[in-house]
Image (cartoon, rainbow, N blue to C red):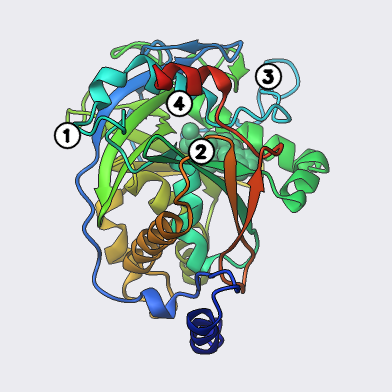
Amino acid sequence: DRDVPKDCSAKRQRTDPKVPPTLPAGPSRYDGPFPFYRRPSEMGRFSLDGQRCYHGDARKLRYYAPPPIEGPSPGFDLRDGYHDRYVRRDESIREGLEHLLRWVSQNRKLLQSEDKGRPLNADFITWRGHLTKVLTTPYETQEGWLLAVSLFRGTLYISEVETEAARKQREERSELLKELTYMGYKFEQYMCADTPDGTPDPTGVVNTNEGFCTVIRTRLGTHSLLFSGEVDCTDPRSPWPDPPSCYVELKTSKVMHSPAQRRSFYRHKMIKWWAQSFLPGVSRIVAGYRGPDGTIVGLETFETMKIFQLIREDPGCWKPAVCMNFCAAFLAFVKKVVTEDNSKLVHLFAWEPGQPVSFTVHRDSSYTFLPDWYVDALST
Ligand code: A3P
Ligand code: MG
Ligand code: MG
């Protein structure tokens, strides 16, 4: 039981102020009612073009255009174009919060607060993907994380730092994994059009520099959140016509043949899919199932809000409430720990499977992540 040390460490923390506090991450102590989570609302949008340049508009938004009938094999060949029509984003470039901060600095008026010392009306600003990692932490057994936090003019900024293990994995990624990654993007190309009434063009180039991002505001318990996340497409014929509900998340996964395979998929993969889409209020996830030859052999649509019904029959499965309660506890922990308002001060929160969340403090170090241009823009 991961939670065994909780009582003694809590006691030690109360009696010894020199021992820095930690946050337990095992699922048992976060089991309880689902916390308050305000319906996410879209505050804005931006796009990244084929050269990874920022544009404060929706030019890279794509439109959901599935094949006419769902169910039978659409026959998409996900390997097509891997060698000759693939422009891959350089993942060694660490962008941090850069694009999101650009949106924030250009849209300050939308976020103005009453409070003079606090230019932005948000407790936390971060990427959706960072929060997805926090949500899945109580159930994660493979990959740890590092999250850098700075408090600047009343708002806490969270920016991920690549772990050594993740860097190694990225640099040593096998040819098979590289092709699988491509296949995920190729699926998007088969399912999306550039215009609301258009049809997909699978003869085009797959360029993973391109992206469309939504900027979302919401509240988890007592924490107001502003985050941005990349969105695969919007459905112009969605039963919920407004963003973010009209957005569709596309995913690929290996085709399943047995109830045991499906259970394992629900336990280990669905948690990530759910967390990613639930946070920004994306209402549908469309799965493309990959056959052994790299073609799509079936499609299945999941309603994000109904996923908990699929998993609750399985007592060994993850619980959405645990994910959200842990996230709320982590944000409260960050608020308690990071109290000095200083854009150059970084608290680095670290978590490894089986361990509680801990942190280290870094002043004027290479961990500093808020860019000078942003600090200047928000100081005037
Ligand atoms: P699949 O998820 O269908 O495999 P997203 O699903 O978040 O829109 O991401 C699109 C694709 O990017 C993924 O498609 C996958 O190919 C790739 N991708 C996303 N996150 C990744 C990660 N952590 N490592 C490797 N590839 C990733
Ligand atoms: Mg995506
Ligand atoms: Mg996707």
Question: Around disc 4, counting alpha carbons within 10 Å, would you say few (fewer than 14), some (14 to 19), or many (20 or more)?
Answer: many
Name the amino acid type tagged 3: Tyr
Visible in this render: residue 76? no
- Sequence order check, earlier mark of 4 and 1: 4
Q: Does the residue labelled 3 lie within 8 Å of ligand 1?
A: no
* C-beta proximity under 8 Å, tags 2 and 4: no
Q: Is mark 2 within 8 Å of ligand 1?
A: no
Residue beneath the point at 53% across and 24% down: 98
Q: Name the residue under label 3.
A: 86
Q: Nearer the viewer, mark 3 or mark 4?
A: 4
Name the amino acid type tagged 4: Leu
Please say if 60 is above or below 92. above
Q: Name the residue under label 2.
A: 342
Q: In this view, does 174 lie to the left or right of 224?
A: right
Q: Mark 4 points at which residue?
A: 100
Q: Distance between the residues labelled 3 and 4?
A: 26 Å
- Sequence order check, earlier mark of 1 and 2: 1
* C-beta proximity under 8 Å, tags 3 and 4: no
- Sequence order check, earlier mark of 2 and 3: 3
Q: Nearer the viewer, mark 2 or mark 4?
A: 2
Q: Quadrant of the C terminus?
A: top left
Q: How far apart are marks 1 and 3 (CA)?
A: 33 Å
Q: Name the residue under label 1.
A: 240
Outermost residue, right side: 172
- Sequence order check, earlier mark of 3 and 4: 3
Q: In which quarter of the image is the N terminus?
A: bottom right
Closer to the camera, 218 or 201? Answer: 218
Residue beneath the point at 31% across and 66% down: 321
Give residue 261's mark: none
Residue beneath the point at 32% across and 18% down: 107
